[in-house]
Amino acid sequence: MTVAVPSELVTLADIEAAKELLAGVIRRTPVEPSRPLTAKLGGHTWLKCENLQRAGSFKVRGAYVRIARLSEEERRRGVVAASAGNHAQGVALAAGLLGITTTVFMPVGAPLPKIAATKNYGAQVEFVGATVDEALVAAHEFADRTGAVLIHPFDHPDIIAGQGTLGLELIEQVPNARTIVTGIGGGGLISGLAVAVKAKRPDVRIIGVQAEGAAAFPVSLREGRPVRLKSFGTIADGIAVGRPGDLTFAHVGKLVDEVVTVTDEDISRALLMLLERGKTVVEPAGSVGVAALLAGVVEVETPAVAVLSGGNIDPMLMLRVIEHGLAAAGRYLAFTVRCGDRPGHLAKLLAYIAEQGANVVDVAHRRQDPRLRLGEVEIGLSVETRGAEHSDRLVNALRSAGYTVTFDV
């Protein structure tokens, strides 16, 4: 990759200094083995559980380093940030520990638990726009108007140095790692991680993962400059960033070996696996590294480590994601059956589905559709199955039994 590199990137010495500053403030999060990923990849695979960090993500690392280095005069003016939630919580927690007032601009529609947590850490929350980029514009305006210091979510040396402390931990915890996979939003985490890891172990491959619906880095790396996406959308709100930072772009271009993308379906499957097999609650943005490994979009050499960068997920989103993940894995099937509208027909249909080993979750009985013939009824069914093959067998069995089976488009 050929990119324009700023004259000074963050160094290992910067990250080691940040580590000293963070002593007693952050947690050294655990690294746990993942049996499903180990089996899939054919070699030891680990999860760096930064979802267990204070405030639920890695963001407090960089936020604390940045804010702790403010002058007394800057501290008196307070700080301002823009975030969909994780950076907001990191800034609010860090500023609270240092006794500094905080204002955070969040997109309208930001997850309610992240809003509540940010307020509980003592920040004043304002809602602006539909994206982090729009909230960041408002934060810049607030800083210009009030003199508050803007704590950028990713594009600042102190932020990158703070996030890089995760890399120091990781390489100590898995010293024989060959591949590290982590998500990318604006690029602060992977930039700091890459500096730390490449300084200690230049042979380790660093792979970044973006959501397909918000992938600004691949096009930017092809163009050799940060490129702003015209539009973007993904369930992984924590990495939904429309443009790489200038500084993070330079780090990624120089130090990151590969950047790949995953779909929202891939992310849903990863969240479901982490919940079912790993007993681990992770937000969509925090699971994209696992999603890339499960989806096979990248070849990795083991031992490998996937970073679970955050665990702040809205319970309502979790319900939808679980359902989506079950559907993506072929374990949740929604379809419509037409049959005669006579006593006993519904019971016969449900009994037949049970005979096929499927579990009916929901039933909707409809007679009013003008497309139905007289004496015909439409039955909407949501069914749990054991996987894609079982789903196919169920549908084929229903059709062989004379039922008309259709799927909503």
Image (tube, rainbow, N blue to C red):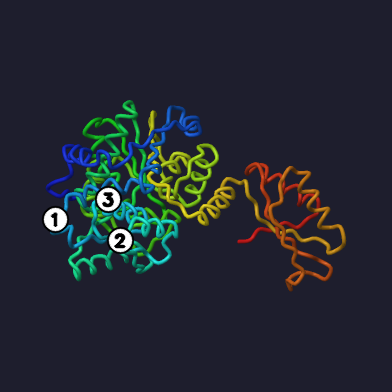
Foreground residue among 135 and 73: 73
- For disc 3, the marked residue is 97
- For residue 147, above or below residue 164: below
Q: Residues within 10 Å of mark 2 (few under 14, many from 20)?
A: many
**Disc 2, SS:** strand
Image spot of residue 62 (x, y percent):
26, 48
- Counting every numbered tag in the picture gives 3
Badge number at residue 47: none
Foreground residue among 245 and 163: 163
Which residue is depicted at the point 73% across and 71% down?
369
Q: Tell me which label, 2 or 1, sits earlier in the chain.
A: 1
Mark 2 to mark 3 CA distance (whole Å):
19 Å
- For disc 1, the marked residue is 72
Q: Which image quarter holds the N terminus?
A: top left
Q: Residue furthest front?
A: 99
Mark 2 to mark 1 CA distance (whole Å):
22 Å
Q: Nearer the viewer, mark 2 or mark 3?
A: 3
Image spot of residue 114 (x, y percent):
41, 56
Mark 3 to mark 1 CA distance (whole Å):
15 Å
- For disc 2, the marked residue is 82
Q: Residues within 10 Å of mark 1 (few under 14, many from 20)?
A: few
Left or right: 100 with respect to 381? left
